Image (spheres, rainbow, N blue to C red):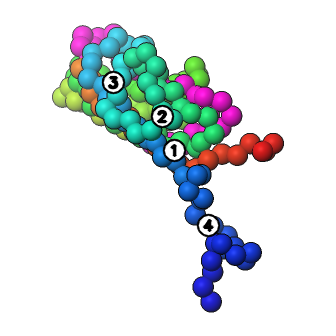
Amino acid sequence: MKLRCCNGNKPPVCPPAPEERPDFFAQFGVTSSPASGSSLPLIQLFNVGEGIRLEGDSDIMLEPGWLYLVDYIFLATPEPNGYMQIVPRINGSLRGLYSFFAPTGTERNASASGSFTTNEAAVSEARLSFHLTYPSTTRNIDISGAVSITPLVRIRNSGS
């Protein structure tokens, strides 16, 4: 017997209706040498649709009503035996659970990557940025990388 989503005996998981599928996604990049304790300055690499946008040079705005997947990867050159730390900031709050601490050895290279989902934009627009920290002994960090954002599923309000 073949189960079909269009009859009354729906299987546990049906594909969403076309209007419930996300039709937007975006990627942002950074190539900079920002100060420690600052947000990474971003540029838009591509943006399909209108649900995600860059506000200013560091804040990514997420359209409400979606669960988002956020992926990031950064490469940098702190001083030998140093470190860099990347901490996502969502709606003004640092999110240590999604952060990455990247130590260097005798070489200057460090990389940080992470992936997380967030429902912070379930009810209202959310603001996402990435906070960079490194030691005061680092003269120049030269960081580059990318942030990709994809809406996964529509989140329905309990009142709707």
Label 4 sits on what residue type? Cys
Q: Quadrant of the N terminus?
A: bottom right
Q: Position of residue 119 (x, y in %)?
A: 61, 39
Q: Position of residue 134 (x, y in %)?
A: 36, 18
Residue labelled with disc 1:
151
Residue labelled with disc 3:
43
Residue 50 - label: 2
Label 1 sits on what residue type? Pro
Disc 3 or 4, which lies upstream in sequence? 4
Q: Quadrant of residue 120?
A: top right
Q: Position of residue 145 (x, y in %)?
A: 30, 31
User: Which sits in the foreground, 112 or 144?
Assistant: 144
| Label tally | 4
Q: Is residue 104 visible?
A: no
Residue 14 - label: 4
Q: Nearer the viewer, mark 2 or mark 3?
A: 2
Question: Secondary structure beneath disc 3?
Answer: strand
C-alpha span from label 1 to label 2: 12 Å
Residue at 32 percent across and 14 percent down: it is: 34
Q: Are marks 4 and 2 in contact (CB under 8 Å)?
A: no
Disc 1 or 3, which lies upstream in sequence? 3
Disc 4 or 2, which lies upstream in sequence? 4
Disc 4 or 1, which lies upstream in sequence? 4
Q: Callout 2 environment at 10 Å: few (<14), some (14 to 19), or many (20+)? A: few
Q: Is residue 159 above or below residue 91?
A: below
